[in-house]
Image (cartoon, helix red, strand yellow):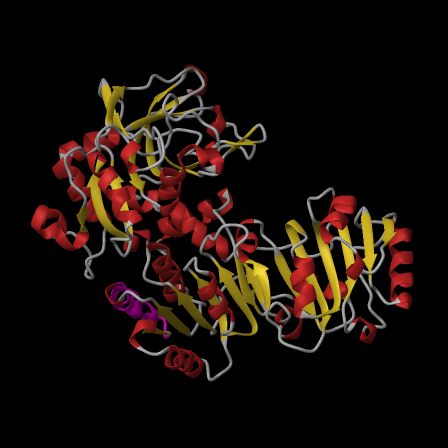
């Protein structure tokens, strides 16, 4: 290790009088910094309850582009006066403590390394790092009570001294991927919630319908609303609900009701926490599904004949954590506990649609590396160059554990031939797992048609609420299919990701496609917006004079660093040490 790098790691208290940062003064890249350059400002001074941290690495994310595009219209900083109170973007950060406020000196010391869980709540309010709080696109920053004493405790996670800065920063986006495979839903009707039981065209066939759990004196919703339930079943369920202590409402037929007025009257307009649809068809599932509350579950008990496809708000599945479960039996409670988990099926078949982008590559890498992962990993993308990188980089990882990776480009064949190829790969059974990484409703709908029995459709791509796509919703009952979507991650997901990184079972460095110094952040964000690179852009803020450089061109710019890249040209801890030794 060079003397310069040793001092950087072991003597972090040496600080400059001024720093460079990228404040956002309004919407658009033109309002980031001044004239395309970072702004010079005084080094912040920590108060008694604050830490002064040095930002060692910052990953750039498409979420940063959303912030730049919307400015003060972004929901996390809505109404903020950016010209006079700018934000500093960047939520994928690796940092080192350089100074400790008087009241924190028993807990922290200079040299401590951390990453931060960006989704921060303080006194009930969202104050996300890189949004409401100044983020990683600055050489130094302050960490205060919002982060250290948030509603979930401390949002900093300690990092080992041997962990690379880039791989630590990239634990944050990787945690979002990990979180999508840890997604859970309630295992029972929501206690103290509002339950709506609706009869459909085939409800009469469910004469013995029952609720074996979640409707008792010990555990029950506060209100049960019954609509179009056959008389005998309605009487029995109403009596059970009343005996449990729930208020019972029996409504007129749905055909004569305004569904929104019904929601307003009995659920305060927030929607129903649980909807039990008895013998419903696709049209009715579509109608009542629109009335789910955030975190709500549509439970399909039995299903009428006909096509399973219904137009559903996939934006709400993604952002509002809506669940869809079902059973062909008569016990509605069974559907909550029998649905398949979110994790990839061991020995299964997994399709990643839109696999060439940074997040898509993370999904494919995880599937390829996972020791108990799928036997077949299918990666599709319309960008031939990116798809080739996916096959070259992750195919050997899959082969190493006895699995197979297949790369397909739908642009290189007709739609019919593409569908036929997908069917052949699963022997016509459909995939056990499908992850959609393209925020296009038609593509989400197409992917949904290739989900097999007890399969899972993971709508990972963020699409706005109100985005409708056709999905086989009745298959939740008929075939045990599950539909999920996740946004962001929890601190437990970040901790799990960092643990895997430090244990050597996960390699976030494989995601790095380009690097740059603090002055390259503007160009880096422009590249993210244009989807220029097949992986992540990582900024090293303590380096001032390194332009945005793809790893494929590193041998021309910094040959001594390029010599430390991995066998497939991937970023490594050794390359990072060489970079810092050369450029600090």
Q: Up-down: is 521 above or below 247?
A: above
Q: Residue at x 82, y 59 (%)?
A: 227
Q: Up-down: is 318 above or below 15?
A: below
In the image, residue 390 lies in the stretch drawn in magenta: yes
Q: Residue at x 78, y 55 (%)?
A: 257
Q: Up-down: is 454 above or below 359?
A: below
Residue 217 visible at all? yes
* Residue farthest to the front, as pictured: 256
Residue 15 visible at all? no
Q: Position of residue 582 (x, y in %)?
A: 12, 38
Total numbered badges shown on the rendered structure = 0
- Magenta region's main secondary structure? helix
Q: Position of residue 548 (x, y in %)?
A: 18, 44
Q: Position of residue 146 (x, y in %)?
A: 49, 27
Q: Is residue 127 left or right of residue 43?
A: right
Q: Position of residue 368 (x, y in %)?
A: 37, 66
The region drawn magenta spans 386-402
Quadrant of the frame with the N terminus: top left
Task: State the image quarter where residue 419 is shown.
Answer: bottom left
Quadrant of the frame with the C terminus: top left
Task: State the image quarter where residue 110 is shown.
Answer: top left
Q: Residue at x 37, y 81 (%)?
A: 417
Residue placed most toward the observer, 433 or 563: 433
Residue placed most toward the observer, 548 or 97: 548
Q: Is residue 268 left or right of residue 308?
A: right
Task: State the image quarter where residue 313 is shown.
Answer: bottom right
């Amino acid at each position: 290790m060079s003397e310069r790098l040793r001092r950087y790691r072991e003597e972090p208290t040496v600080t400059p009088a001024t720093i460079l940062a990228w404040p956002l003064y309004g919407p658009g890249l033109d309002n980031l910094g001044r004239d395309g350059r970072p702004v010079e400002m005084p080094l912040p001074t920590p108060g008694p309850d604050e830490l002064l941290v040095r930002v060692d690495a910052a990953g750039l994310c498409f979420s940063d582009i959303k912030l730049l595009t919307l400015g003060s219209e972004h929901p996390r900083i809505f109404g903020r006066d950016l010209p006079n109170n700018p934000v500093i973007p960047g939520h994928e950060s690796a940092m080192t403590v350089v100074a400790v406020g008087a009241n924190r000196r028993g807990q922290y010391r200079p040299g401590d390394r951390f990453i931060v869980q960006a989704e921060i709540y303080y006194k009930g309010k969202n104050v996300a790092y890189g949004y409401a709080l100044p983020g990683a696109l600055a050489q130094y920053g302050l960490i205060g009570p919002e982060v250290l004493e948030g509603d979930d405790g401390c949002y900093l996670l300690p990092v080992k001294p041997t962990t690379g800065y880039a791989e630590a920063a990239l634990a944050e986006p990787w945690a979002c991927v990990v979180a999508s495979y840890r997604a859970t839903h309630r295992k029972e009707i929501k206690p103290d919630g509002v339950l709506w039981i609706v009869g459909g065209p085939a409800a009469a066939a469910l004469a013995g319908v029952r609720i074996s759990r979640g409707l008792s004196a010990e555990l029950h919703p506060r209100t049960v609303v019954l609509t179009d339930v056959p008389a005998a079943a309605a009487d029995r369920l109403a009596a059970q609900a009343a005996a449990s202590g729930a208020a019972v409402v029996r409504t007129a037929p749905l055909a004569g009701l305004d569904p929104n007025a019904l929601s307003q009257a009995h659920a305060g307009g927030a929607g129903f926490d649980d909807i039990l649809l008895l013998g419903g068809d696709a049209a009715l599932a579509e109608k009542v599904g629109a009335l789910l509350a955030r975190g709500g579950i549509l439970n399909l008990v039995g299903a009428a004949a006909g096509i399973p496809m219904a137009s559903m708000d996939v934006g709400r599945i993604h952002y509002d954590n809506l669940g869809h479960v079902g059973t062909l039996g008569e016990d509605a409670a069974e559907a909550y506990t029998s649905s398949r988990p979110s994790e990839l099926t061991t020995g299964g078949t997994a399709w990643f649609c839109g696999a060439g982008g940074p997040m898509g590559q993370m999904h494919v890498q995880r599937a390829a590396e996972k020791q108990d992962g799928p036997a077949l990993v299918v990666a599709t993308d319309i960008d031939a160059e990116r798809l080739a990188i996916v096959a070259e980089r992750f195919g050997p990882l899959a082969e190493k554990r006895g699995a197979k990776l297949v790369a397909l480009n739908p642009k290189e064949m007709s739609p019919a031939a593409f569908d036929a190829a997908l069917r052949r790969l699963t022997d016509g059974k459909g995939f056990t797992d499908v992850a959609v990484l393209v925020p296009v409703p038609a593509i989400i709908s197409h992917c949904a048609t290739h989900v097999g029995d007890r399969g899972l459709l993971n709508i990972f791509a963020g699409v706005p609420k109100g985005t409708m796509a056709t999905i086989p919703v009745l298959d939740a009952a008929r075939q045990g299919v599950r539909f999920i979507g996740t946004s962001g991650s929890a601190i437990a997901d970040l901790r799990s990701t960092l643990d895997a990184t430090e244990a050597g079972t996960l390699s976030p460095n494989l995601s790095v496609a380009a690097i740059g110094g603090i002055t390259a952040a503007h160009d880096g964000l422009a590249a993210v917006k244009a989807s220029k690179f097949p992986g992540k852009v990582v900024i090293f803020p303590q380096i001032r004079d390194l332009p945005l450089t793809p790893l494929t061109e590193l041998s021309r710019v910094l040959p001594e660093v390029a010599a430390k890249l991995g066998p497939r040209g991937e970023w490594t801890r050794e390359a990072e040490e060489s970079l810092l030794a050369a450029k600090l």
